[in-house]
Image (spheres, helix red, strand yellow):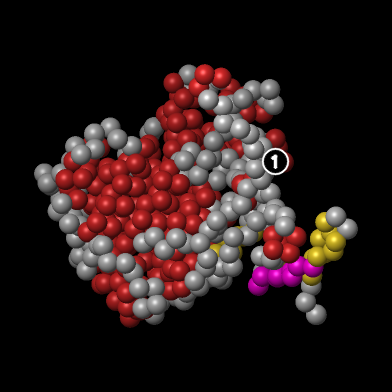
Amino acid sequence: MSKTAILEIDGNRHEFPVLVGTENEVAIDIDKLRSATGAITLDPGYKNSGSCKSEITFLDGEEGILRYRGYSIEELAEKADFLEVSYLLIFGELPTAKQLEQFETDIRKYTLVNEEMKNIIDGFPKNAHPMGVLSCLTSALTAFNPKSVNVDSEKDMYEAVCKTMGKFLVIATWTYRKSMGFPLNYYDNTKGYVENFMRLMFELPTGPYTPDPTIVAALDKLFILHADHEQNCSTSTVRMVGSSHAGLFASISAGVSALWGPLHGGANQAVLEMLEEIQKNGGDADKYLAKAKDKNDPFRLMGFGHRVYKNFDPRAKIIKKAADEVLATLGVNDPILNIAKKLEEAALEDEYFKSRNLYPNVDFYSGIIYRALGIPTDMFTVLFAIGRLPGWIAQWKEMRVNKEPIGRPRQVYVGSPLRDFVPFEKR
């Protein structure tokens, strides 16, 4: 027997279906609410509203669970690589060895970026924020790929996926090269996807560059952990823009802009800015731990706790190990990272933080890794975007294939009622 929810307005009772997801998430289907009652719901930030049904990612913040297509993030991070997980997210199943090889081969077909894109990136000042440049370059790809994707054609969709995966990685690294004044690099089709990221970023014409396998493995893992995270701000943006039947590049560009914000993808940048501020003011971690505990002090520790995870961030447990391995491999002696380690130890051992579940999250550890690699702080969110790309593509694809309606939220108007126009001389 199906469940229903009863809503009573002005003495009139209305029934609405109750849906239950495969992980027992309960939702009241209010699709007919306005037509049946004339009322809408008000839910600032959409914290209690489901915008879609999705088969891609399951997240349980209370229990610290994250799964892609039913597979635990722990198992995927341990046993799969980033392109394997990308295929899973986008196409629904883990690829066979042959499918994965073909996927990588097909991505390589589209890694060459039109030379005229260099004219666009040359128009930006050297100090332009890489996320602003990346958003514009992603949108500009539409000009060089004007044909709209036929979402009813598996061939067209597959080609669009491979094209986006190939070109986005290249232009993302170009934002770094531009800021450093380095010549722009090209994808090497003899090397893997994450290894290419490293050489696209750091290889100079003055000599060969060989990425350390430990660092490549850590970044591969980090990209997997960032690959999707349910209906977050940037993902919802991609789906919203795509619901107007905007193309994939335009929708991804919008997602990049949404990710840029410090409350979303910019959080790992905020972590390093906090650490730099502590270092600039004497480097006393204990002083700032005390400030964090003082409810009358506005200071808060960035990179601790999570808006969704009320227990622990399952991604943080995985990436902590990778961060430790990277620091050991590089032998970094950095006062900023020493402060980070002290904050981490305190948060894991101090009862104040433990009782409030203020554990280090994935942004904390990703910031440490990027800092250790010598990546500038304002590039951190670009790396987040590279990892999140397959999730955005998967969500856009699901929304278009399911023929979801255009997104159009309602509002409660609280402005002035009807009033008469006042001429200039009477104002």
Q: Residue at x 64, y 38 (%)?
A: 418
Of 37 and 322, the residue lying toward us: 37
Q: Tell me the residue that label 1 is attached to.
A: 356
Residue 422 visible at all: yes
Q: Quadrant of the C terminus?
A: top right
Residue 395: percent from the left, percent from the top?
47, 64
Badge 1 local density, few (<14 within 10 Å), some, or many (20+)?
A: few
| Region of the chain picked out in magenta, as a range | 15-22
Queried whether the magenta region covers residue 173, the answer comes back as: no
Please tell me whether residue 32 is drawn above or below residue 177 in the rendered image. Answer: below
Of 5 and 138, the residue lying toward us: 5
Residue 366: percent from the left, percent from the top?
45, 46
Q: Is residue 179 left or right of residue 1?
A: left
Secondary structure beneath dot 1 equals loop
Please tell me whether residue 268 is drawn above or below residue 51 in the rendered image. Answer: above
What's under tag 1, amino acid-wise? Arg
Residue projecting furthest to the left: 206
Q: Quadrant of the N terminus?
A: bottom right
Residue 129 found in image quarter: top left
Q: Is residue 56 left or right of residue 374?
A: right
Q: Main secondary structure of the magenta part?
A: strand
Queried whether the magenta region covers residue 21, the answer comes back as: yes
